[in-house]
Each structure stands twice: as C-alpha cells, then as structure tokens.
Image (tube, grey):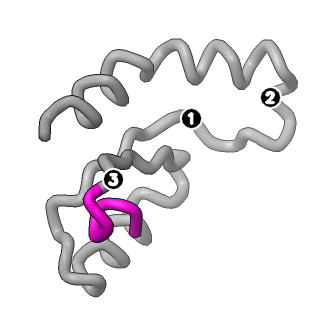
Amino acid sequence: MAERLGVPAVSVMTTRFTSAAKLMAKVLGMPDYPFVVIEHPISNAGDAGLEARARAVLREIERDLLRH
C-alpha cells in the first residue's frame, strides 16, 4: 500500500466490494484505511458514466488525501 511508503492514497470501490475492502484493510493492519464508494457495476457505465461517478466522489477523495 502506498501509505506505508508515506504516499497519501485513497482506494475507490464499488458498492459490491465494500465488505471485502474493509476486511482486507483490517487484515493488512490498516482498519481505518480510507476508501470511497461508487455505484456497481462499472463495466457497462461507459466513459460518461464513469466520469459522472468520479465527479460525484471527487470531494471525498480530496478530503481523504488531504487529511495527512
């Protein structure tokens, strides 16, 4: 993980994988590791749909990156 190297990082998960992301962070010893959630699925979202999802969580990503 980048944060272990001192590089601020945020993961982006879809709603389908939030439980797995929480468990993985806990197992890796980083239970408070930040991640942002977007709607699942993304495979059929297209460029415009992906951009809309990214824009919707941009403030959350900025907040988590700047919390250091």
Task: Judge from the rendering whether residue 18 lies leftward or rightward of residue 53; answer left or right.
Answer: left
- Image height check: is 54 above or below 27? above
Magenta stretch in the rendered image: 1-6
Q: Residue at x 44, y 50 (%)?
A: 11
Instruction: Determine whether 29 is above or below 31 in the image.
Output: below
Q: Cα distance, mark 3 to mark 1?
A: 26 Å
> On the image, numbered disc 2 is attached to which residue?
45
Which quarter of the picture shows residue 2?
A: bottom left
Q: Is residue 21 above or below residue 53?
A: below
Which label is found at residue 7?
Answer: 3
Q: In the picture provided, is 42 more to the left or to the right than 27?
A: right
The single residue placed furthest to the front in the displayed view is 6
Amino acid at pointer 3: Val
Q: Earlier in the sequence, mark 2 or mark 3?
A: 3
At 23% from the left and 25% from the top, the residue drawn is: 63
Which residue is more in the foreground, 47 or 19? 47
Label 1 Cα crowd, 10 Å radius (few <14 / some 14-19 / many 20+): few
